[in-house]
Image: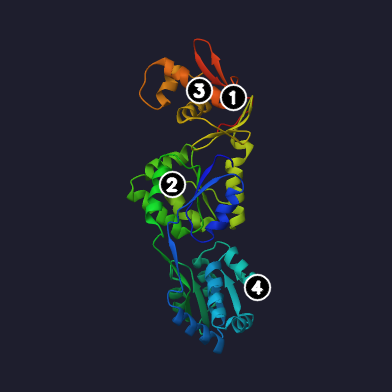
Amino acid sequence: MAGCRVLVTAQRRSDELAGALIRRGAEVVVAPTLGVVPHIDEETLLVRTREILADPVDTLVVTTAIGFRGWLDTAETHGLAEELLAVLDGVRLVARGPKARGALQAAGLRADWVAESETSAEIADFLLTEGVEGTRIAVQHHGAGDDGLDDRLTGGGAAVVNLEVYRWGPPPDPAAVEDAVRQLAAGLFDAVVFTSAPGASAWLRELVRLDVSDTVRALVADGRLRVAAVGPVTAEPLQVAGMRPVVPDRGRMGALVRRVIMDLGDEAHGLRTCEGVLHLRATTATLDHVVLPVSRGGLAVLRRLAQTPGHVVTRDTLLQVLPGDSDDPHTAEVAVARLRDAIGSRTLVRTVIKRGYVLDVLPSVTTP
């Protein structure tokens, strides 16, 4: 991923996500669109935890891994973790997706049922179909708070114990979010990564506020920006907004990282040229994964030539994409000469006498 710039919009596990991308050579900017407010009412959480210890519920619904871990951390701080795990071992455990199931497994527990769609609606449908009248159900809520699950279970006759461990709050650095969005709209990022639906929605609202939604959609449509979401739930608001997110086969952080690496670093997404595999990045270009010291003008020339690899591009056409408003064909010649110097090769961009220039590619190439 040499030369790639990636925007990470998450606060939770952002160090882990950024570190995995940086190790593959990417430059990463972290600008969380939402903050996490932990233990917003720890006293109430402890009261309800002690209620469950004294009178165990029939079912526990775990909606997020971080929320469940946070609950255990709070219990451990107050000397209740061991007793809580022993009680939960005898409770039916329902997980909202693989990450929630993984958190249960890490604590030595096993989920009895998992909502593969990662939605609270699927959980409600499953439990109501079985029948919940007369049962007590504890629900650990995710950062957006109650999303209607409590009401549906209560309507079915269940007594619901609400466990609110954290809530989404404002971004820790709103100025950083705005700056990142403006850079992204200017075409200075190769990818933007999301790990939660509320975070994706907050990012979309920022695009609207800055009036750059259409600009960003155009970058996505042109293939110059990849939008990646950890799972289908996170992807939904992005899809509705026309951002065409890519989603890994499994809703895990590692799978998300691998998908981004494959999309940005795979040779299949580059151009096979006479000098090696060429990747065009947001702010630079690489040849066989080595960053080329190209200028802004040189990158503009390369990008235009790569639109029609193997075909002649005239000097006048190159003038249209170069910075400035020169109409002198010599300006295009100078830009190409400087590009060749930066690349260290005169064969990658070949001159066609009296016609223009061509990017020398091998047969059966894939345009990025």
Query: At x 52% / y 70%, what residue is drawn?
Result: 67
Considering the numbered disc 2 on the image, is that residue within a helix, a strand or a loop? loop
Q: Residues within 10 Å of mark 2 (few under 14, many from 20)?
A: some
Image depth: mark 4 or mark 3 in front: 3
Image depth: mark 2 or mark 4 in front: 4
In space, the residues marked 2 and 4 are separated at their CA atoms by: 38 Å
Q: Kindly identify which numbered label has been placed on residue 110.
A: 4
Q: Quadrant of the C terminus?
A: top right
Mark toward the start of the polypeptide (4 vs 3): 4
User: What amino acid type is highlighted by mark number 3?
Assistant: Arg
Mark 1 = which residue? Answer: 344
Q: Residues within 10 Å of mark 4 (few under 14, many from 20)?
A: some
Mark toward the start of the polypeptide (2 vs 4): 4
Residue positioned most to the top: 354
User: What amino acid type is highlighted by mark number 4?
Assistant: Arg
Q: Nearer the viewer, residue 304 or 16?
A: 16
Q: Nearer the viewer, residue 172 or 50?
A: 172
Can residue 55 be seen here? The reply is no
